[in-house]
Image (tube, rainbow, N blue to C red):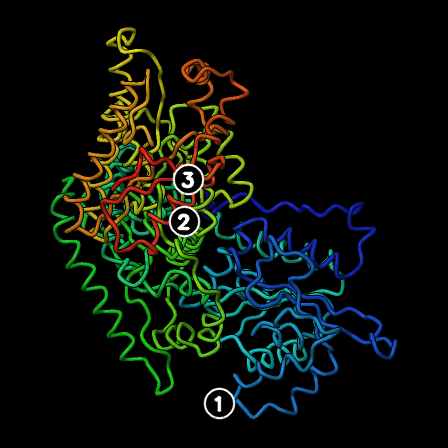
């Protein structure tokens, strides 16, 4: 959780012994990673660092001064050395002769590649001139909440003087770019003893001649601001004091589970969106406050904030004292439409003749009194990071409004950054989304071979995946492997018994809170049993029916209810069996339950079609590797049925097939991907056999 201000002071993490053996570029990386490791210093992807380093020219061998500066799109907390752009300082100084004035400053970005040192492919960012022209070897540009709270105050210049004296200067708002770089140079030359500057509505610049000194100075300045705020705000009420009381945590999550899929359905018109829920202390203090609505309407200040969160959030009309969730859900379409209209009007007021076209007019941030904050974006990581940025904005509003008046960035200035042609060019360079980007899948039996393989296939195509299984240990093993490859944002686990109605409903609600909704259900949980009919107990029969028939019904019903609330369609994939079409000896309970699955899928395909919910079936056969149903008695029972042993069973199945090939979990996963993706957008009610060929299971 991000910390609010006032907060504990920042402690130095610099290790002299570790830094002693580093080159200057390595010290720059070390400093950058340390600064980026604490969200009180800068937000994800925000801020930048630089060092001017003497290096041999690769052609002449002569010493050249080279600017190492964080490249475009990087994150100081997680970047490596290849995240820095490198540019000749003499060429950067020569750029001044090409500058034609403020009206033409954007064209200066096009000259930066001509300054590249050593053919470095990392693109230089728009902030490069801000670092190049500060006449110090090391420069940090950070976005600390405590500093931006000063920068976003109505009397930020006076507060800067009060807190720092002449040590840290102040410059009025100026959009990042070449002109601001010249402003910084002018300030440094006119104030040679200054150690840094506060940029109005933006952030902090600090500089020094040594890497460690620069790092320690940045911490010192932020700590000074933290301590000042702690003293000034000790006895005050933030945001005008509380107006609402937070609901208990289970109730907050229950409300979020109802709101999130409803919102998601309205904001996923152009592409599927993924949600994130935050009910941290900082968020709850803000959403429950008397001044929340007024402050939220002012918009964010720091450019990094509103590029991630839009200029302002949408405040949902929920009253925690009344618990009016039904009325809120009924009125939600009108609220969202009003926000879109307001955003479109903002675009029309501020656009220029060459502005990019209107982008998605939906809100990114949704504030819910008594409950928390919901954010939506094209993927989970972006939704989570957007929430982190708005927590930064909350911290800024908290500090600024307690010592002064908070000021959002003027509307036109905000628009000029949001629709900056350079930003648009960056967006156009983004890679094409993967085929399941923005989709959320829930896979039952997710700890088994087929379930885990299907999850991996979906993750490879950009989906977020919820693994559900009755085995806690199995879930831990399966999820750990997937998280290592695809990241923690993309994978969630749920301990779920598909035969327990309450557990199923709770699990789907939890999936909503984690990702905002659901697009794909893979019903795959299973068991297997083998016994002659006269030896089949009622308990064994019922167990098959409970898991393979009733369980499929319960998860499908929960998925249908959720998908209908979203109203953006969906895909349900049943993993059935060849045995649902072709009878097998000594397996009447299993075969009958599997046949029930297949017919249930046909019924659901009929019911779901008008809502765009497609229901299809994958029919595997003899998937031995990694399958949990072969771990118990089923393996020995089937081997006995066919007169072979455990080692010979897979060979027997392979030879029995028409294609004489083994069927693997990955083969089933490929079919499950096809049936969930837009490749099969015009298919429902189908059965896809993946059995290496079995004429008894032909569907026609």
Above/below status of 469 relative to 409? above
Give whichever of 280, 267 is nearer the camera: 267
Q: Are marks 1 and 3 in contact (CB under 8 Å)?
A: no
The image position of residue 625, as x and y in percent, is: 50, 29
Rendered image: mark on residue 668? 3
Give whichever of 110, 493 is nearer the camera: 493
The image position of residue 664, as x and y in percent, is: 48, 36
Q: Nearer the viewer, mark 2 or mark 3?
A: 3
Left or right: 664 with respect to 507? right
Earlier along the polypeptide chain: callout 2 or callout 1?
A: 1
The image position of residue 560, as x and y in percent, is: 20, 41
Earlier along the polypeptide chain: callout 1 or callout 3?
A: 1
Q: Are marks 2 and 1 in contact (CB under 8 Å)?
A: no
Q: Are marks 2 and 3 in contact (CB under 8 Å)?
A: no
The residue carrying pointer 3 sits among few (fewer than 14), some (14 to 19) or many (20 or more) residues within 10 Å by Cα, namely many
Q: Could one spot residue 504 in this view of the protein? A: yes
Which residue position is annotated with label 2?
Answer: 463
């Amino acid at each position: 959780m991000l910390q609010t201000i006032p907060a504990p002071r920042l402690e130095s993490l610099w290790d002299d012994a570790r830094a002693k053996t580093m080159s200057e570029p390595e010290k720059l990386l070390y400093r950058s990673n340390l600064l980026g490791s604490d969200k009180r210093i800068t937000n994800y992807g925000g801020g930048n660092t630089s060092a001017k380093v003497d290096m041999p020219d690769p052609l002449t061998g002569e010493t050249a001064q080279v600017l190492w500066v964080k490249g475009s799109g990087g994150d100081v907390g997680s970047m490596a050395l290849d995240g820095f752009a490198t540019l000749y300082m003499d060429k950067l100084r020569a750029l001044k002769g090409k500058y034609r004035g403020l009206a033409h400053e954007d064209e200066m970005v096009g000259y930066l590649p001509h300054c590249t040192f050593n053919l470095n492919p990392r693109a230089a960012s728009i902030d490069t001139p801000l670092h190049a022209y500060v006449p110090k070897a090391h420069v940090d540009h950070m976005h600390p909440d405590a500093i931006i709270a000063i920068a976003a105050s109505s009397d930020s210049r006076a507060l800067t003087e009060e807190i720092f004296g002449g040590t840290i200067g102040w410059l009025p708002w100026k959009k990042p770019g070449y002109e601001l770089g010249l402003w910084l140079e002018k300030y440094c030359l006119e104030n040679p003893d200054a150690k840094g500057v506060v940029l109005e509505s933006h952030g902090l610049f600090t500089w020094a001649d040594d890497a460690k000194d620069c790092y320690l100075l940045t911490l010192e300045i932020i700590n000074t601001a933290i301590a000042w705020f702690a003293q000034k705000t000790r006895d005050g009420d933030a945001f005008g004091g509380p107006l609402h009381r937070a609901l208990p945590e289970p109730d907050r999550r229950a409300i979020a589970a109802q709101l999130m899929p409803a919102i998601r359905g309205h904001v996923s018109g152009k592409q599927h969106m993924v949600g994130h829920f935050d009910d941290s202390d900082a968020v709850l203090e803000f959403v429950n406050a008397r001044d929340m609505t007024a402050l939220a309407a002012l918009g964010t200040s720091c450019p990094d904030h509103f590029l991630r969160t839009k200029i302002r959030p949408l405040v949902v009309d929920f009253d925690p004292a009344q618990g009016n969730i039904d009325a809120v859900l009924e009125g939600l379409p009108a609220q969202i439409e009003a926000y879109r209209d307001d955003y479109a009007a903002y675009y029309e007021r501020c656009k220029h003749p060459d502005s990019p076209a209107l982008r998605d007019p939906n809100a990114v941030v949704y504030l819910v009194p008594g409950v928390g904050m919901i954010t939506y974006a094209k993927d989970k990581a972006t939704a989570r990071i957007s929430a982190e940025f708005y927590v930064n904005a909350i911290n800024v509003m908290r500090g600024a409004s307690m010592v002064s008046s908070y000021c959002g960035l003027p509307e036109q200035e905000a628009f000029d950054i949001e629709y900056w042609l350079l930003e648009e060019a960056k967006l156009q360079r983004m890679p094409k989304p993967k085929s399941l980007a923005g989709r959320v899948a829930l896979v039952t039996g997710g700890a088994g071979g087929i379930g885990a393989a299907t999850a991996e296939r979906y993750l490879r195509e950009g989906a977020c995946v919820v693994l559900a299984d009755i085995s806690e240990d199995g879930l831990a093993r399966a999820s750990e492997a997937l998280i290592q490859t695809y990241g923690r944002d993309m994978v969630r686990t749920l301990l779920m018994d598909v035969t327990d109605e309450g557990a199923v409903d709770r699990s789907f609600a939890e999936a909503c809170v984690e990702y905002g909704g659901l697009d794909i259900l893979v019903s795959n949980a299973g068991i297997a049993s083998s016994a002659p009919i006269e030896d089949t107990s009622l308990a064994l029969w019922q167990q098959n029916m409970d898991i393979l028939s009733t369980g499929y019904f319960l998860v499908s019903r929960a998925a249908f209810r959720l998908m209908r609330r979203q109203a953006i369609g969906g895909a349900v994939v049943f993993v059935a069996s060849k045995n649902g079409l072709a009878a097998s000896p000594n397996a009447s309970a299993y075969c009958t339950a599997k046949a029930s699955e297949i017919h249930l899928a046909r019924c659901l395909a009929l019911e779901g079609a008008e809502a765009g919910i497609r229901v299809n079936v994958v029919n595997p056969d003899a998937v031995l590797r990694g399958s949990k149903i072969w771990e118990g008695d089923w393996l020995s029972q089937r081997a006995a049925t066919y007169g072979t042993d455990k080692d010979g069973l897979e060979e027997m199945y392979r030879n029995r097939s028409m294609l004489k090939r083994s069927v693997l979990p990955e083969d089933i996963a490929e079919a499950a991907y096809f049936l969930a993706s837009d490749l099969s957008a015009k298919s429902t009610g189908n059965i896809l056999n993946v059995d290496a060929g079995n004429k008894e299971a032909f569907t026609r």
